[in-house]
Image: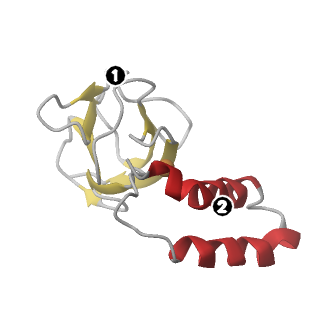
């Protein structure tokens, strides 16, 4: 793997993550981003969420039984997490995350019956480059 050649890139990403909220480091972060953009792209193996069901910001009126997420590449089988939380902060998934054995970029979890409202999906996976990737998106259930 060409992983070593991307050390600078990963260090820069980590740097930016660490200093995300520190405005004093913005100039340096921009420089590192520029540096990262000059490195070859083909060895990047950092997982990115590419699709979900329901989709980000979707409004659904039919009952949904599960939430599915797909990444741009397979993700690790360990430390994966998927949680669906209602607007009151209550978890409404069944804590039964599954990784699709036929498509390791695909994870899903089943849901309790959802009342109308806005829900937040939070996910955490480990990329094949060993980086932990977390994120969230929302969808809304409206009365049929
Ligand atoms: Cu990565």
Camera-nearest residue between 64 and 33:
33
Residue 99 x %, y %:
25, 29
Q: Which mark is residue 12?
A: 2
Q: Is residue 30 left or right of residue 141?
A: right
Residue 34 visible to the viewer? yes
Q: For label 1, count other residues whose C-alpha is less than 10 Å away and answer few (under 14), some (14-19) or many (20+).
A: some
Label 1 sits on a secondary structure element that is: loop
Number of disc labels? 2
Q: Residue at x 30, y 61 (%)?
A: 58
Q: Residue at x 38, y 52 (%)?
A: 45
Residue 67 x %, y %:
27, 40
Label 2 sits on a secondary structure element that is: helix
Q: Is residue 70 left or right of residue 23?
A: left
Marks 1 and 2, the one that precedes in the sequence: 2
Respond yes or no on whether mark 1 lies under 8 Å from ligand 1.
no
Camera-nearest residue between 91 and 34:
34
> Is residue 63 shown above or below 72?
above
Residue 80 x %, y %:
41, 29
State the residue position of label 1: 94
């Amino acid at each position: 793997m060409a992983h070593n050649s991307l050390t600078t890139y990963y260090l820069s990403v980590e740097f930016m993550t660490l200093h995300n909220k520190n405005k004093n480091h913005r100039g340096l972060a921009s420089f590192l981003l520029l540096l990262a953009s000059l490195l070859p792209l083909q060895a990047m193996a950092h997982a990115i969420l590419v699709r979900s069901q329901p989709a980000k910001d979707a409004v659904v009126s039919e009952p949904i039984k599960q939430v599915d997420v797909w990444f741009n590449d397979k993700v690790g089988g360990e430390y994966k997490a998927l949680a669906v939380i209602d607007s009151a902060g209550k978890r409404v998934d069944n804590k039964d995350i599954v990784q699709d054995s036929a498509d390791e970029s695909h994870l899903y979890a089943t849901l309790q019956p959802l009342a109308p409202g806005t829900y937040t999906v939070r996910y955490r996976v480990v990329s094949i480059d060993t980086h932990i990737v977390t994120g969230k998106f929302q969808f809304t259930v409206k009365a049929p």
